[in-house]
Each structure stands twice: as structure tokens, then as C-alpha cells.
Amino acid sequence: MTASAEPTPDDVVSAAKALHALTAIPDHSPRWSNTAEPTQWTATHTIEHISDALLFYSG
């Protein structure tokens, strides 16, 4: 996906596959509070943003 292109179904599948590995991290793990480099967001905020973006683009 380019910066100006709308996400495709393949982009959604790629995002889901990338996020699936995170299901192995327990909800109570302190890792969710760590900053997700190179942003200043926590890991939780980053996951929320990805989820929100996928819902936004799904219409």
C-alpha cells in the first residue's frame, strides 16, 4: 500500500497477520505500556489506532 492509496483487502489480511502474534502477550503484561518505537505511543495506543483505521476504511 502506498501512502496515498486506499487499503486493499490484502492490506487488511496483512495487518491481521501482523497483529495475531500479539495474542500471545497476556492482557496484564507491562509490555502493553511500553512505547512503540519510533512513535511516542504505547503499544496499546498503537493497536487501538490500527483497529480504528481498519474500521474507518471498511466503511
Image: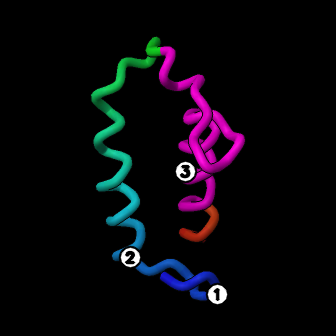
Numbered label tally: 3
Q: Give the Cα separation between the discs numbered 3 and 1.
A: 19 Å
**Secondary structure of the magenta portion, mostly?**
helix
Disc 2 residue type? Pro
Q: Give the Cα separation between the discs numbered 3 and 2.
A: 14 Å
Q: Secondary structure at mark 1?
A: loop
Q: Is residue 53 above or below residue 8?
A: above
Label 1 near label 2: C-beta < 8 Å? no
Q: Is residue 52 magenta?
A: yes
View extreme (front): residue = 38
Q: Secondary structure at mark 2?
A: helix
Q: Give the Cα separation between the discs numbered 2 and 1.
A: 16 Å
The nearer-to-camera label among 3 and 1 is: 1
Query: In this figure, which residue is indicated by the disc labeled 2?
Result: 9
Disc 3 residue type? Ser
- Magenta span of residues: 30-55
Q: Is residue 41 left or right of residue 7?
A: right
Query: In this figure, which residue is indicated by the disc labeled 3?
Result: 51
| Mark 2 or 1, nearer chain start | 1
